[in-house]
Amino acid sequence: MKKSLLWITILVLSISMLAVFSLAGCKTTTTATTAAAETTAAAAAKVFTILFMPGVADPFYFTMEKGIQKKVDELGGSVKLLVAEYPKSWGPEAQVPILEAATAKGGIDLILIAPTSTDALVAPLKKLYDQGIAIITVDTYLGDGDYSKDSDYSFPLSYIGTDNKLGGQKVAENLAKMLNSKGKVYLMNTNPDTSSVVDRGKGFSEGIAKFPDMTLVGTDYCMDVQQKAQELATAALQKNPDIAGIFGVNLFSSQGSYQAVVNAGLTGAVKIASWDATQDLINALKEGKVDMILAQKPAEIGFLGVEWGYKYLKDKAEVPKKVIPGFEFFTKENVDDPNMAQFIYSK
Amino acid sequence: MDNITIKKNGLHELFLQLGNKWIFFFLLLEVIIFSIISPGFFSLNGIQTILNNSPSILLLGLAETFVIITGGIDLSVGFVMGFSSVVSAKLIVTFVGLGMNDALSIIIGIVITICIGIIPGFLNGILIGRYKVPALIATFSMLGITHGISELLIEGSAAKNLPALAGKIGNGSLINMVPGKTVSFFISPTIQRGEHLIEILPNMFVIAFIFVIFFAFILKSTKFGQHTYAIGGNIDAAIRAGIDVKNHIIKIYMLSSLFATIAGIIYMLRFVTGKADSGVMFLLDSIVAVVIGGASFYGGFGSVWKTVIGCFIILVLENGLRMLGFPTFYKLVLVGVILIFAVLVDQFSPELLHKED
């Protein structure tokens, strides 16, 4: 019985392989015709399909999708949007299978992706690029993010995202302002494998270095776990009880840090800066748990991604290798300002 | 088996008839349904996608098959996989740094990783076989130890900067061709953009499957395999029959770690990254695959091929739902339902009835 099972499996597999060959044959001809169509003036009438591949299920990417949708609606019927499943965890082993499943059908012209690893996504995306799909990385990038010089990872059209390093520097400057340019500060980072937060950290330490009376006494990685952030910050506060400011690079790192500050009885004495204007963090700011938030513009990133991608697909326009939307700062003073409400991320 | 008498009633009869065959028909049904309702599922790309995702769950499933047949469980495989992805990546980067050429660094790095990777299994085996520590406790401790060590090695980050060759092997296929132009094996050729590259059988799947075929044979047709079943079936009888149970259990857990190590090396080649938690999401799926495949946690039953079918039931379901745009949550629910069904069928299977007698 077991043997027969094996034989049937082999039979089915071989039949499927055969079927696949014939299907693949058909496919080549269709791609050939579309390729031919692209070169002619008929390209103007083509409906372009855009795939959005988010990094992980969180408000930042939900907001980005809203921005993408907005531009797609603006363009009317000339663009069709597909949104891949939001990965539940951050990493290539979660993202790549979703990306491959979403692209297996074919028929995609442009992918807007937030790569979850600077190295691991290079090969899978290169394969899609070789099929003729245009690729724009949003929020995070491949390699070192510089697509202007020739390299294994320089094939994407563009990187559209916040200048995290500049953001980190600005956080340092604003924190320095709050602390009258003196004192010890501490950096709570999340994950050294993610380009965006690493750059935030780099920018922050460079920014702090500009103030002679300020020192960065430590950096820890909480791996996006609030509990771990709290433990690490508690340890840091025990070691340096005179820490005056903490920069938590996202929600979990800053909330964990805040909790540690409260437990150490230092509420108010330690200023906490954070990143990403999620509703949770805005609430934390209103409650006084956080003193400053840098808001990225995910909706604008998504909007620009579609805008540039469409320009490229339709008119073969030259796309800048880096497109950097700005950011805004939330503090207790402006958090209730109706003009700022647009920068709070959606759920 | 024919001489076993069983009380028969309607439901009983149905489950008996379904017996061992249902998983195969279930898989077939899944494939047929998805081929009809999901465009592109039954295409070369669709199949490649499933095969691309398969090595981790196949190898961890293979590991759990051997362990579960002996009546044990190995919770450490997920983090042994992560551990070996980290160790191999670190070693290869070190060798390349020392000026060794890429191919040689990769080969030596992998060989050393395999040697290191079976140590957790050896320790598990000693604890479980010799000192009678419950498998759950021993392997759970090893889970923590391997996790901790890998995080220490990479200092909470991911091991990177592997040579490009690693990624080429890990993402290549056995046969790559541009119709009428080039054919290459193992590594994708450099092609003109827009050319249609046909890839058949991902390298990493082929490697995993070679292990599956070889160890299916070992389990089914060798003395080693018979002893494995004997220990799971009745450990006291196995001892009386003169089987060296202690050493056999050590070997089983070493094998389990070996498969997890290979899975980690495959992860490292495919994602050119070593990551401590790379195997976390596959541990549960692999155990589920083994149970769907009819193995019993009481030991003594199970087969590699049925585990393989169990793995593909999960993989096909996952990929089919994904291509239709359903979130993974549906997969979790459906796998749960299938699992309950599998266990129910087992309750009525003739082999188990026989055991209860």
Image (cartoon, helix red, strand yellow):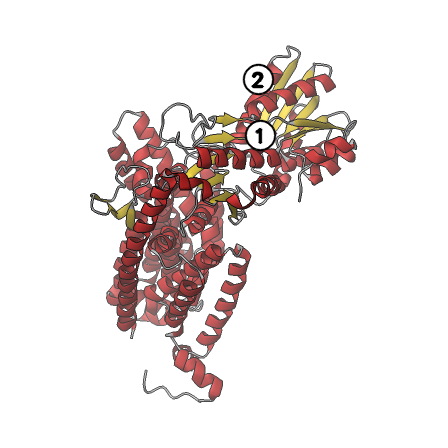
Number of numbered discs present? 2
User: Is residue B202 visible to us here?
Assistant: no
- Quadrant in which the N terminus of chain B is drawn: bottom left
Is the residue A338 above or below the residue B328 in the image? above
Check whether the beta carbons of the residues at disc 1 and disc 2 lie within 8 A of each other. Answer: no
- Residue A163 locus on image (x, y percent): 56, 25
Q: Secondary structure at mark 2?
A: helix
Question: Which residue is nearer to you in this view: A94 or A17?
Answer: A17
Question: Which residue is nearer to you in this view: A157 or A265?
Answer: A157
The chain identifier of the residue carrying mark 1 reads A
Is the residue B150 above or below the residue B100 in the image? below
Is the residue B77 above or below the residue A111 in the image? below
Relative placement, left or right, of B171 versus B183 is right
Quadrant hosting residue A326: top right
Relative placement, left or right, of A227 versus A312 is right
Which residue occupies 42% across, 57% down? Answer: B128
User: Is residue B144 visible to us here?
Assistant: yes
The chain identifier of the residue carrying mark 2 reads A
Q: Amino acid at mark 2?
A: Glu
- Residue B154 locus on image (x, y percent): 45, 34
Q: Nearer the viewer, mark 1 or mark 2?
A: 2
- Residue A43 locus on image (x, y percent): 42, 40
Relative placement, left or right, of B171 versus A204 is left
Q: Which residue is mark 2?
A: A206
Q: Secondary structure at mark 1?
A: strand
Which residue occupies 32% across, 32% down? Answer: B163
Say if labels 1 and 2 share a chain.
yes
- Quadrant in which the C terminus of chain B is drawn: bottom left
Q: Amino acid at mark 1?
A: Asp
Residue A311 shows which numbered tag?
Answer: none
Residue A220 shows which numbered tag?
Answer: 1
